[in-house]
Image: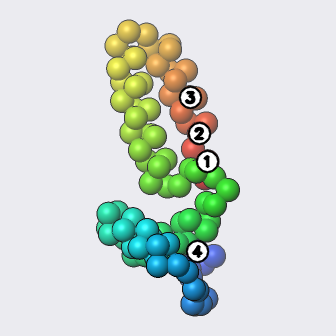
Amino acid sequence: MRKKEDLKSVRTSIAMTEATYNDIAKEAKMRGIKPNAVMNERLNHFQSDNTPSKMVEFQDFANMAVKMLSQHSAAEAKILEEEANKKWTF
């Protein structure tokens, strides 16, 4: 169950260009989510490029790199893993 502060209780309508709407709708369809989820994500992360979907891609890449590096140097793989974990901020 979601935390009380995460529940969305305010509804509003906004005006936007057709190009902006098409961009939002396209991303929502591609990701299999609703357009309002895309809009909320963009609003909540407007100062940072670290959106949840991009962070998942980054983590997958980091995990793959750590796995490959661990075959050659466990110590360096550990350092890479720690550095990747520091990037987990939204």
Residue 82 disc label = 3
> Which of the labelled discs sits on residue 87, or is there none?
2
Identify which amino acid the numbered label 4 is placed on: Asp
Could you tell me which secondary element the residue under label 3 belongs to? helix
Question: Picture coordinates of residue 9 (x, y %)?
Answer: 59, 87
Looking at the rendered image, the disc whose residue lies closer to the viewer, 1 or 3, is: 1
For disc 1, the neighbor class at 10 Å (few under 14, some 14 to 19, many from 20) is few
Query: How far apart are labels 1 and 3 at the CA level?
Result: 14 Å
Q: In this view, does 66 lie above or below 72?
A: below
Identity, as a three-letter code, of the amino acid under mark 1? Thr
SS at mark 1 in the image = loop
Q: Residues within 10 Å of mark 4 (few under 14, many from 20)?
A: few
- Are the residues at dot 2 and dot 1 in contact (C-beta closer than 8 Å)? yes
Residue 37 seen from this side? no
Dot 2 crowding, Cα within 10 Å, few <14, some 14–19, many 20+: few
Q: Name the residue under label 1.
A: 89
Question: What residue is shown with label 4?
Answer: 6
Return the disc, 4 or 1, that comes first in the chain's sequence. 4
In this rendering, position of residue 46 left or right of residue 54: right
Whether 80 is drawn above or below 58: the answer is above
Q: Which residue is drawn at 57% across and 44% down?
A: 88
Instruction: Report x, y in % for residue 3.
Output: 57, 73
Between the C-alphas of marks 4 and 2, the distance is 23 Å
